[in-house]
Amino acid sequence: MKILVCISQAPDTTSRIAFTDGGKTFDSTGVQYIVNPYDEWYALVRGIELKEAHGGTVTTITVGGAVCDPVIRKALAIGADDAVRVDAEPTDAMQTAELIASYAKNQAFDLILCGKETIDHNGSLVPAMVAEMLDWPFIALATHLEVEGIEASLKRESAGGTEHVKVNLPLVLSASKGMAEQRIPNMRGIMSARSKPLNVEQGEAAAMSSVRQFSLPPEKGACKIIPADQAEELIRLLREEAKAI
Amino acid sequence: MSVLAIVSLKNGQPTKGGLEAASYAAAYAQAQGVEAVALVAGPMQSDGGLGATGIVRVLHCATELSDSSQWARLADAASKECGASGVVLTHDHTGRAIGPRLAVRLQAGMVSGVTELPNAGAVRKNVFSGKAMADVEVSSNTVVYSVTPNAFGVRDGGGTAEVSAFSAEVGEARERVTGFDPASADGQTPLPEADLVVSAGRGLKGPENWGIVEDLAKALGATTACSRPVSDIGWRPHHEHVGQTGITIRPNLYIAAGISGAIQHLAGVNQSKVIVVINTDPEAPFFKAADYGIVGDAFEVLPRLTAAVKALDA
Ligand SMILES: Cc1cc2nc3c(=O)[nH]c(=O)nc-3n(C[C@H](O)[C@H](O)[C@H](O)COP(=O)(O)OP(=O)(O)OC[C@H]3O[C@@H](n4cnc5c(N)ncnc54)[C@H](O)[C@@H]3O)c2cc1C
């Protein structure tokens, strides 16, 4: 099985979020970048598990500059065979998806696995866009994937529950929690990642949207503390003051 | 010209998220002085209440569709039929599967998870998992927006919409739905749509103690949620996990018991309108993000709250 996993970098989850340039640019000073958790924990690990069970290869693809190389090496250390970086600074999902789809088009992949969203832009757009560009089936928010021959059996989050779906390969999916368990790279993985191929490709595509301005949510006011033995008072406040219940 | 809402149905009725998308589309259409149209697929009684949200015309496809590619083709045909300059969906599984496919077909810029109407050519959405907001501009003539659940609300202005049958060539279904497991046996509102949420963390000490969490949720008519470690250890199902790497929610009320309030947890819940924190540790970081707090033992406080809620309604 030939598997492509889309990998994005994202600021570490403990990062202080701030902006410079009058709110136009994310302030990356002191920010540690990680592999976007949904891409790493769920999409990549499931790809590697499927390769271990059925044979084949796992390639990662990242759209971004050379600053992304450390997170790409991390993905290789976890167990991907090789990596592609499309050298571009994407502005939006359409552009990113176009670059990924153009690369994937002639490579005969069976599966393209993505995380459900990045934890910085929270777009959830690239996976289905890639599917449409390739005219492949797409499963959003997949929590389970098994492959037998050309048939994939999946579970996906849907309104009020989990839906079971079958689809023939090739297929694009966005992975959500439940798909796989996080894997910590071992020493051998980290050593071998250094010599695995990381191919840099060129590509061009147009963006259709851009961020004009970032801002931070307003600060919360002070917390009103209610004594533990007056829990009834909290319920009264929730009804009469906050009008929440 | 028009704005087109893509509305999902459940049991023959628009979902809450679908009504929110319709309400948003109607308000957006009104601001531009164009017609508000909705597209539905599957069995539905009369206008399904869409007229009350401000929708004027409903395009009704009688066939139920679950395949995102078929849906995108249907929506593509519908947006051409009504000359849509904007298409609005819900930012749930439908907005994540159909919206981006449709954007590609229409060659339209898409902004997902919008929380407000567009203003001066930009539309606001949450980024960094709720830690910041971004105003996004779209450069294409047509735009596709998906609306964050619970952000915009459902408009109820009375009125009925004219319903007309609609169909289009949508190609073959490639997804075959073979089963469905409901998230909860007792019909709780799905977490992303819930107005009231009762959530608990590692402070509850074990899955056998969740009865007191469920009792309060039941008394309030709330949906239950949990912190990440609780779902990781298997005390609670994965779909209850809220936070930066779980579900992002914005209910009217979020009650958190025995949750410390780590930054990754807060990211997913800090847009809740009212936050209540119950924690034995007065220094727990969650109190800084809370509106109301009780420094106390969840094992004592939760049953008291449940009794107080029951007394209110008695
Ligand atoms: C990359 C990454 C992503 C993450 N994503 C998420 C996420 O999406 N969601 C998430 O929740 N976490 C996430 N985490 C984990 C997060 O950092 C915290 O570890 C987690 O939220 C802590 O869960 P908790 O509050 O239940 O447990 P703890 O931090 O152990 O807190 C338990 C709390 O219960 C209190 N307590 C104990 N006994 C009682 C009692 N009897 N009554 C009342 N209170 C009591 C304690 O004082 C304490 O504050 C993520 C971490 C990483 C590194």
Image: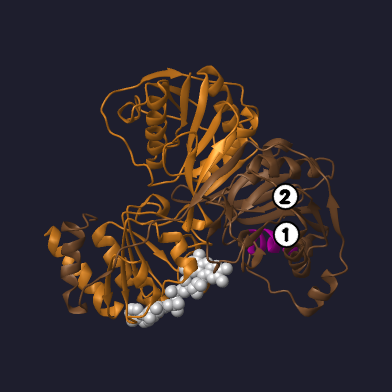
Residues packed near mark 1 inside 10 Å, few (<14), some (14 to 19) or many (20 plus): many
**In whole angstroms, how far apart are the C-alphas of marks 1 and 2?**
9 Å
Q: Quadrant of the C terminus of chain B?
A: bottom left
Residue A185 drawn above or below residue B311: below
Q: Quadrant of residue A75?
A: bottom right
Residue at left offset 56%, top offset 49%? A24
Magenta stretch: give its range.
A39-49
Q: Secondary structure at mark 1?
A: helix
Residue under circle 2?
A112
Q: Does the segment drawn in magenta span residue B183? A: no
Q: Residue at x 57, y 48 (%)?
A: A123
Mark 2 Cα within 10 Å, few/some/many (few <14, many 20+)?
Answer: many
Left or right of B109, for residue B219: left
Give the color of chain B as drawn: orange
> Do the dots labelled 1 and 2 sit on one chain?
yes
**Ligand 1 found in image quarter:** bottom left
Residue of label 1? A47
Residue sticking out furthest to the left: B314
Dominant secondary structure, magenta? helix
| Residue A100, x across and y down, in percent | 75, 45
**Image: A160 above or below A195:** above
